[in-house]
Image (cartoon, helix red, strand yellow):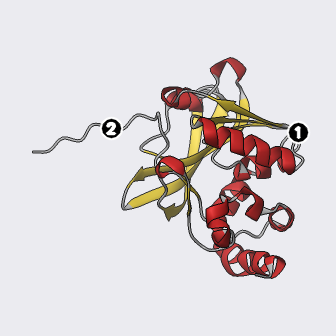
Amino acid sequence: MDVERARFNMIEQQIRPWEVLDPSVLELLAAVRREDFVPAAYRALAFVDTQVPLAGGRAMLEPKVEARLLQELQVQRHETALEIGTGTGFMAALLGHRAQRVITLEWDAELARSAAANLRRAGLTNVDVRTIEAAAAARGLPAEAPFDVILLAGSVAEVPRELLAQLAPGGRLAAIVGEEPVMRARLVTRVGDAAWQQADLFDTVAPRLAGFPTPSRFIF
């Protein structure tokens, strides 16, 4: 496989048509080696428009979804970011290239070790991979808040208020919210002490993140 041609085609045929037009985001996607973050068994899928399976029913999201979320978050160099659901570390790497500091939380110890190794090899020294209990994921890191950016790297039924409270003024949170078959990528911005604005970005489907509450379903 011609890796650089495949990377170019991913950007031009998948990502750019998905309204990812920020030159800095496109340049970053051309520079960060996504293939180095894909499990060896699925390396052939590194540039394909599909989710890459991970342990425990998890997945790396499609390249176009990753790119669009990164663009919408508008991460700035002076900002601190929190990611929940490290996976292989690829999104943490993208955030690390744009933010001053990134903390990423992972409950699968093997994935956390692999992600930390991937990030070291990629030269990212400002990304801190932390292993937590799955039940603690939805609580974020209140002791280290506020954060300018929070990214949920998977889907949730709803975004916990506790996470929204950890956003700094002007801070942004991106998540995929809802129930199958229709979920929506959502951007929430803190606009006041107790005020947030939300915008639905696009429809998609993603595996659930562990530790987040699921609303009760009543059958009549």
The secondary structure type at the circle numbered 2 is loop
**Quadrant placement of the C terminus:** top left
Residue 34: x percent and y percent?
75, 62
Residue 19: x percent and y percent?
68, 71
Instruction: Tell me if residue 84 can be seen.
Output: no
Snapshot quadrant of residue 11: bottom right
Residue 107: x percent and y percent?
57, 34
Residue in the picture at 67% in, 50% down: 88
Of the numbered discs in the image, which one, if any, rests on residue 100? none
Residue 143 as seen in the image, left or right of residue 194: right
Residue type at the position of mark 1: Thr
How far separated are the C-alphas under marks 2 and 1? 38 Å
**Quadrant placement of the N terminus:** bottom right
Snapshot quadrant of residue 12: bottom right
Say if mark 2 contacts mark 1, CB within 8 Å.
Answer: no
Of all residues, the one furthest to the left in this rendering is 220
Residue type at the position of mark 2: Pro
Residue 94 as seen in the image, left or right of residue 107: right
Residue in the picture at 81% in, 62% down: 33
Categorize mark 1 by other alpha carbons within 10 Å: few (<14), some (14-19), many (20+): some
Instruction: Tell me if residue 173 can be seen.
Output: yes
Residue 134: x percent and y percent?
51, 31
- Which residue is disc 1 drawn over? 125
Q: Is residue 95 above or below residue 210?
A: below
- Which residue is disc 2 drawn over? 215
Residue in the picture at 44% in, 57% down: 183
Residue in the picture at 84% in, 68% down: 30
Task: Report the mark closest to the observer, 2 or 1.
Answer: 1
Snapshot quadrant of residue 20: bottom right
The secondary structure type at the circle numbered 1 is loop
User: Who is closer to the viewer here, 124 or 206?
Assistant: 124
